[in-house]
Image (cartoon, helix red, strand yellow):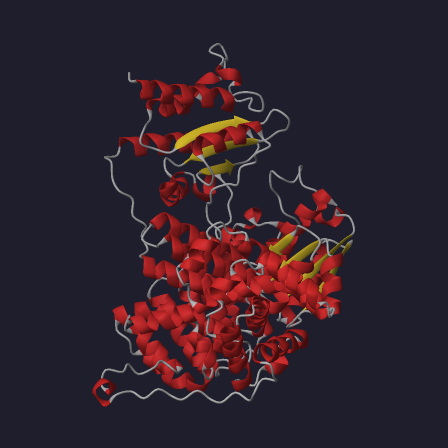
Amino acid sequence: MTQTQNQQREALEGFLHRFFGPGNGVWPNLDPDYRHKDRTLPFVEAFRRGDDAPVVLPRVYTDRDRFVVYVIAQEPGERAKTAELIRAFAGPTYIAYDEQVGIQPAWLDPDDPIEQAIREFAGERTTFRLETGRTLEHRRNLAGALELMQRTEARRPPRMWRVAKPIGRLLAEFDASLSAGAEAASNVVLEHLVAAGGVTAANLTNLRIKRLDRLGRSEEILQLPELPDAIRQDPPRPVKEAILTAVYAALEEPLTEGDLSSARAKLQERGRFVPALLDTDADKLGAQAVAVLLMAATILEDLPALRRLVRAVRNADRIGELPPLVWEDAQRVLAEGVGEAVPPVEAEPVPQVPEDDASKTIPPIDSWPAFLAAVAAGSRAGKSAVEQRSWTAWAPPAVHDASLAGFLDGLENQAAEEAWRAVGAFIDADGYVAPAGLTAHAFIRNAVAFDRFGPGDLAALQALTEIALRSGPSAHTYAELLDEIGAYSSRWVSPERASIALDFVDRLFLVACPDVDARSKLAYNLLEPLWRHQGRLNEADLAFAKRLSRELGVDFSWQDRVGSDDDERELSLSDLPPMKVLLYSLDDAVLSRCAEEIKQLAPAVDAAKASDHVGSAQLRQKARSADLVVIATRCAKHAATGFITQHARTEHIHYADGSGSASMLRAAVAGLRAAAVDH
């Protein structure tokens, strides 16, 4: 045995003795005389042999009645493979997990000696922490399933793992989940993209920034260690805007209070990356991003940049959107720079295209019909329009609703597959104003035809259904739409995906119903699997399922309360102490229904509602006084979302994994339980 092999063996044995040391009672100190060692020995032997299979190590906590099994992926790139193996061998039968989120690596506790040992040995985000019921039979069943998983995988010939979904489809699902407000699902898809490879580090950073921006988590954007490299790679305009908006979050309060010097100091402290973004085209940036650029150019006394920014603001007639202090300070610096007031800005001449080059000019993508055609063709221009969010400057899809729907329905398979890349942009562009119901319905047919039932896809399907129903379809179209959704519901409805199914049913109740029979049929198809497995529903999902059954006249006999092995350990919601929760969404009906259910489940909890489009003194007060904040990002405005996260004094900020009442209620219940521990 070489010196290197000896060192590896010593490291392995050292880890095992730490893992089975204080804090783990399953095989204390690997004592050879321990009478129950045979239950754990197969896992230890497989680890020592170095089998080509995930590492499996059980643990019994010594300070409480808790049993977990850690499954460690061999390499960080094998996380997706390991999750699929766990699902295949243990699945929902032996372990509990949220189907919307999937089986995900755990964040290990550095203050726990056992989990810290794993972190030092295997690194971060390679370990899955699995739990089962409290009885000995539950524990033996899980251990047996994972031992079979190890043996089976170790006997297979070595092979390269490939993620089933291609990169393009994963990117489309990521965009769709973000637009649909599926916070957890977007994280799952991002993890899959990391595991799949084929996406550059810079592009992965761009995706992380887009996700954090959607959640209003400005501080996390500015603390990303990859941020300097991402900026050097000249990221797409939306990523630049997200970075600038994150900086503005620190400047907003002093600017509101009229304290320009403090705002300038904050910018110099937090905006070290801003000078590298000064050449960003301001025409399509939001007012907050433009304000940051103006302040940076003013502080640096970069007159060429300042003139260009001022020209862009004036030409677009956007002076009123900016904080007055910022605009006035920019005028002062410009005036001092030229020794006089700034002269009126003349429009820049339009460059002439030589006749010889005119035929080579690519027609610009400047409308939704051109956009969908470019995306369906898989063209570089179409992909660029998706990345740059070019569609924000166009007339909404509703203007072209019939023609867009006809185009989508007429696509061949490959083009239809490509067209799904635009679904996230379509959902975003809907904007809760003028719904393009026919186009939404065409996208739904696309989803059903291509079996798009992944976590992010389902969130998009629910958002598309909301758009289609809000457009007021005829009785025939309404029935057709509901039948298409119900025909494949058996493929995805389960207790683990209960909140998605309940969001669909909730929307049926909230919109006008031109066909009661069609509504009842779909409600039955979505609720019946949950009723059959109601013992596996959590408290929030069971409560809302009972409410929807009553409201829609779907007669199921639901149990009074959740029954699970956790009942003895968890405090009942009705016994929670007085707390304040802030619910944020632009959908007032969802806010009201969620608040009503919280009052029923936890009478001592005070639920405040907010649907502001921008920050306000009232919203600041609600955020500061809340013990828990729950945000639905599908029904949100980024300015308000960032304002809430900036001013909230609680660490308990939860995001609904969807835009419906059930998703928000589930997030609220989980958040209340977490907040109660610290209350």
Give coordinates of residue 155: x percent, y percent: 27, 31
Give coordinates of residue 341: x percent, y percent: 61, 84
Residue 585 in sight: no
Determine the residue located farthest toward the top in the rendered image. 33
Quadrant that contains the N terminus:
top left
Does 444 sit above or below residue 653? below
Classify residue 189 by image quadrant: bottom left
Give coordinates of residue 176: x percent, y percent: 44, 65
Residue 582 in sight: yes
Seen from the viewer's position, the closer of residues 425 and 250 is: 250
Give coordinates of residue 530: x percent, y percent: 53, 54
Does 635 sit above or below residue 104? below
Quadrant that contains the C terminus:
top right
- Please report the residue visible at 33 percent of the width from the left and 67 percent of the height from the top: 449
Classify residue 314 by image quadrant: bottom right
Determine the residue located farthest toward the left in the rendered image. 356
Classify residue 606 by image quadrant: bottom right
- Please report the residue visible at 45 percent of the width from the left and 28 percent of the height from the top: 57
Does 656 sit above or below residue 469? above
- Side of 606 where 644 appears, left or right: left
Seen from the viewer's position, the closer of residues 3 and 17 is: 3
- Please report the residue visible at 38 percent of the width from the left and 61 percent of the height from the top: 171
- Please report the residue visible at 27 percent of the width from the left and 83 percent of the height from the top: 361
Marks counted in the figure total 0
- Side of 323 where 221 appears, left or right: left
Seen from the viewer's position, the closer of residues 562 and 269 is: 269
